[in-house]
Amino acid sequence: MKAPDLRQTLMDALSKTGRASSDYDLNKDVVLPTGRKLTPASVLIAVRADTGRVILTKRSAKLKHHPGQIAFAGGKQDANDANAIAAALREAREEIGLMPDSVEVLGTLPPHETVTGYIVTPVIALVHGAFDPRPELGEVSEVFEVPLSHVLDPAMFRVEGRRWQGHRRQYFVVPYGPYYIWGATARILRALADRMT
């Protein structure tokens, strides 16, 4: 898909209405406590304009939280961040060396609530020009790319489950080669895929 078509396709998806997603979507029996406090965060769904591939990371195995998992560049919104978009751009620069001047932000998806207490704003953007990843080794062990067509095809997703905090929890997965994409990352991609159909 050429860049103008890719841009229009993503803009069309962003223009559709949709509800917020959560790690609980497939687990209807979960009762969330009222008054819970969620920490604002954001992630960058960075799509290469020249190849139509999504940039993802493999988190360092040394991290205390979510070691070795596949994730978007992103993280907690800091007090110095003007908004969720600024947080996503800052995190992408820090984690993978993606400079903001090569990023064209297209918009945001509705927020995603995680089981770990974050309310995550997914920021969709095109990456223009050359990009030579520079992973922050304390956080990121690998930067890789997946075809957007793969993660936007609902047929590529499946539902799996495991026990978590004494209960069976179901979640989306969208594997790609050796990469097991699951949890919040897969759920956010599925929310985008649902808007493309």
Image: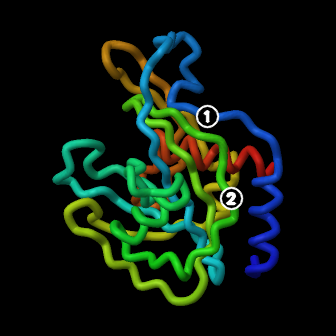
Given residues 174 and 79, the one toward you in this image is 79
- Tell whether label 1 touches label 2 (CB within 8 Å): no
- Dot placed on the residue nearer the N-terminal end, 2 or 1: 1
Report x, y in % for residue 86. 50, 61
Secondary element at image label 1:
strand
Left/right placement of residue 50 relative to residue 14 reads left
Q: Residue furthest bottom?
A: 130
Instruction: Please tell me which residue is depicted at 58% across the width and 45% down the height of the picture.
Output: 188
| Mark pair 2, 1: CA separation | 16 Å
Please tell me in which quadrant of the rendered image residue 150 appears.
bottom right
150 shown above or below 197: below
Q: Residue furthest left?
A: 62
Q: Which residue is mark 1?
A: 21
The amino acid type found where label 1 is placed reads: Ser
The amino acid type found where label 2 is placed reads: Gly
Left/right placement of residue 172 relative to residue 153 reads left
Given residues 82 and 197, the one toward you in this image is 82
Q: Quadrant of the N terminus?
A: bottom right
Given residues 135 and 118, the one toward you in this image is 118
Secondary element at image label 2:
strand
Report x, y in % for residue 176. 50, 58
Report x, y in % for residue 148. 64, 64
Q: Which residue is mark 2?
A: 107
Does residue 155 appear in this view?
no
Instruction: Please tell me which residue is depicted at 33% across the width and 78% down the height of the picture.
Output: 134
Report x, y in % for residue 141. 27, 65
Scheme by which the image is coloured:
rainbow
Instruction: Please tell me which residue is depicted at 83% across the width and 58% down the height of the picture.
Output: 12
For label 1, the crowd category at 10 Å Cα-Cα, with few meaning under 14, some 14 to 19 and many 20 or more, is many
Left/right placement of residue 39 relative to residue 109 reads left
Instruction: Please tell me which residue is depicted at 42% across the width and 29% down the height of the picture.
Output: 115
